[in-house]
Amino acid sequence: MPDADVDEFYARLAAVNPAPASELVYTDPYTLLVAVVLSAQATDVSVNRATERLFQVARTPAEMVALGEEGLRSHIRTIGLFNAKARNIIALSQALLDRHGGAVPADRAALEALPGVGRKSANVVLNVAFGQPTIAVDTHAFRVANRTGLAPGRTPREVEDRLMARTPDPWCRHAHHWLILHGRYVCKARRPECFRCVVRALCRYPAKTEAPAAGPAHPPDPARTS
């Protein structure tokens, strides 16, 4: 995608969604961090379903540690990799108490030092909780960046670096949400819905899809007309 089109690309996404937001349900940086850790290889819907009950009993690092690994597992069994996630969440909660006075740090290195928190998760927390202009590259953002030609790359880090280099400052705050949501609902993995894509004219994807044909008209149902 030419540099001249990048600003227009984001402007079009912003026009249809001026204030994009995470679809994870959270109330503060800690509950966001827990939800983000749970969301690895899981849908936001499944995470929200689990945390709706979990956050009624444990919404702080101290409460989570008191709940314990077994208690936490009972709330998140419907989420993939729940054993490892329970172990990491208890460990990171204890680490927050030991190292940060129970607060979630607004620092990348400190976040990535927590159990179960990688670069993508840290980017989400830094952006959503603390307003930093980071770009988290999940499978949706990775697909959109490559498919459109916005920031092609072979790895999430390569795509992230290219997005950071190409995204104009006014768009950085919400860039990853626009990319994620566009990939989730329009630029889908198996069959992108190019026919309703607002950035179609700027996209370099060659196999653009058209709107599905209308189904054949059915004759009136005699049972309903008699």
Image (spheres, rainbow, N blue to C red):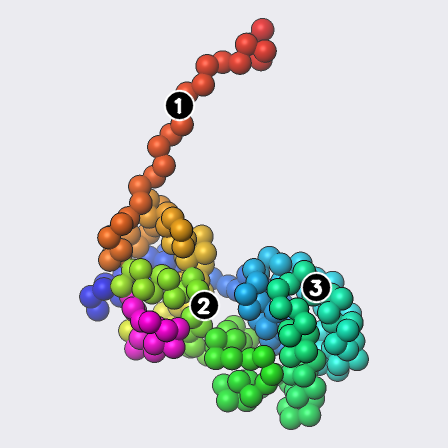
Q: Secondary structure at mark 3?
A: loop
Q: Quadrant of the N terminus?
A: bottom left
Q: Residue at x 40, y 27 (%)?
A: 215
Query: What's the CA distance linking mark 3 and mark 2?
Result: 23 Å
| Front residue of 205 and 175 | 205
Residue type highlighted by circle 3: Arg
Question: Helix or strand or loop: what does disc 2 sit on?
Answer: loop
Give the residue number, with chain letter if any, for mark 1. 216
Compare marks 1 and 3 and give the one earlier in the sequence. Answer: 3
Residue type at mark 1?
Pro
Q: Earlier in the sequence, mark 3 or mark 2?
A: 3
Q: Which residue is mark 2?
A: 138
Circle 1 packing at 10 Å, graded few (<14), some (14-19), many (20+), is: few
Residue 16 in sight in this render = no
Up-down: is 163 above or below 185? below
The secondary element bearing badge 1 is classed as loop
Instruction: State which region is magenta.
Output: 150-165
